[in-house]
Every structure is written in structure tokens, then in C-alpha cells.
Amino acid sequence: NPSTASASEIVSGALQDDGRAVILGELTYGKGLVQTLIPLDADVNLKLTTAKWYTPSGRCIQKDASDESDEEPGREVEALQVEEGGEDAEIEKSLRTTGGILPDIVMEGDRVTRYGFELERGNHFFRFAVEYLIEHPDVPRDFRAGETLLEEFRSYLEEVEFDYESAAERELERMRQLATEEGYEGQTLAALDDLGTRLDDEKRRDFERNLDYIRLGLEREIQAKAHGDAAMWEVILRNDSQAQAAIDLLLDPNAYARAIQGKEAIAAVGDAEEEG
């Protein structure tokens, strides 16, 4: 995914080039620089970029510095026209991406809502887990967040007066300022106030809309404190749609064979071009 970078891109790209693995997920970050440390004195070193990493096929892993797209760097994929058995076939070449590794099977990952992001930024799952484990020190390894725990977390958020500014609220405030500057009538401003009330009502339903993510956050942090990182990652991977899709693919020999064969076919076309 977009957080995958450097060494993991080199390995996955090499496996992909040689048809030895199926890559599933999203376009990777695109970080493939080789940097050399040059000592300047006893306490200072100069880190200088001296090379770039390439996969065996010649793909440069490093994102093109001229590509200013933050969300999907180097997403361009060219189509290569080849002649096979007397018929033209259009094959998407992941080898043509400008930076990063484009998966063989593109699958969007789980997205975090603004509500979930603000819970993470405020370390609320972590803080609640610390308090919870003081009162419940013997949490089992198969612990799951049930309704009782969810209500306890809701009460905790009320106690700490958790709040945040949503993107809709930010835009509404901007509209209020513009309306005031333009001298709009009072009825228009009143309508914006009514909209603000509706947005407040929507925010009060954020907890219910994010129950799955809240369960994940609670289980992740409580397991991490009770049983360590291994237990934490079990929770994370169990709830990761991309990881589960990869497991399902590995457990389906026919589907995996088809995916590998498709990758080998693309690699074979690339070899034929070089020989020609």
C-alpha cells in the first residue's frame, strides 16, 4: 500500500518481475534511493544520494520528483501492443510505472474516517486501554470488544469531552464568513445556522457509524498492553481487508495459479521483446 517503501518495494518488485509472486494491494510509496554517508568531522556526516534502486527488469523504484501527486504517485500505466498468435493483444505492463510497485491485483485498502483519525490523534484508544487494564489485568488472548466495552468507551469519550471539527463544519464556517463579507441577508445566515445544527446531529451519530473501527482500536490497544506486539498484529491483520484477501488467494490454489500464470505471461512477453 502507499506506506510500503524501500526494501519491501525492492523485494516485491523483484518477485513480481520474475513471476514468483502475486502482488496485491495499492501502488507503493516509491522510495528507492541509495544514500552514502560522508564524514565531515567527528560529529557531522553528509548524507548524499548517489544512486537509485532498480528491479531486475529495469524499473526504477524511486518516485519521479517531478510528479507532484501525493495520493497516487506514478500511477500511469502504459499499454503495450504485442502480436501473439497473429492477433494483437493489449497488455497492461506494471513495468511501465514511474516509481513504486503497481500490484498485479489492485485492491483499495481500508480507509479511516475523520472521526477515527481524531480518535487516533488524541491517543484515546491507548489511554482507555491503560485505564481498562488497571481494572481488568487478566485479559485473555482471545479477547473481543463487546457491547459493554463499547459503552464504557463511549462514557470515557464523554468524560474527556472528546470533540473535533469535521471537514463539513470547516466548510460551513468558511461559507458563513463569505456570506457575511458579501452582505447576504439574514435569512441566508439563518439557513447556514440551521445547517450547522444538522451537522451537530450528524456528529452525534459518528460513534455508531464507526463501531467496527472502534472495536478494532480497542482490541488492538488492549491486546498490545496485555500480550505484546504479536497479539496486537494479530488483531490488525485479522481486520485488514487486503491481508485477508491475500490469505484467501493463497488458500485457493486454482485462483493463485491463474494469477501466477498471468504474471508469467506478461514476463514472457517482456523477454520476447528484448530478444527481438
Image: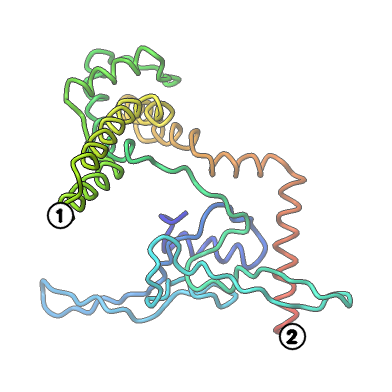
Is residue 58 left or right of 35 when viewed as pictured? right
- Report whether 98 appears left or right of 196: right
Residue 245 position (above or below residue 215): below
| Image disc number at residue 60 | none
Dot 2 corresponds to which residue? Answer: 275
Secondary structure beneath label 2 = helix
What type is the residue that disc 1 sits on? Glu
Image quadrant where residue 250 sits: top right
Residue drawn at 31 percent across, 31 percent down: 198
Residue at the farthest right position: 86
Q: Which residue is mark 1?
A: 181
Camera-side residue: 153 or 33?
Answer: 153
Position of the C terminus by quadrant: bottom right
Q: Position of residue 153 (x, y in %)?
A: 29, 20
With 129 as the anchor, is 273 left or right in this view? right
Relative to 195, does residue 145 appear above or below in the rendering? above
Q: Position of residue 59 (x, y in %)?
A: 54, 75
Contact (CB < 8 A) between labels 2 and 1?
Answer: no
Q: In the image shown, does 223 or 103 lie closer to the viewer?
A: 103
Residue 28 visible here: yes
Residue count near mark 2 (Cα–Cα under 10 Å), binned few <14, some 14–19, many ≥20: few
For the view shown, which residue lies furthest in the bottom direction? 276
Question: SS of the residue at dot 1?
Answer: helix
Q: Position of residue 72 (x, y in %)?
A: 45, 62
Q: Nearer the viewer, residue 43 or 2?
A: 2
Q: Is residue 227 visible?
A: no
Instruction: Give the Cα separation between the discs numbered 2 and 1.
Output: 68 Å
What x and y, as percent, mark residue 52? 42, 77
| Labels 2 and 1: the sequence-earlier one | 1
Q: Residue at x 49, y 46 (%)?
A: 109
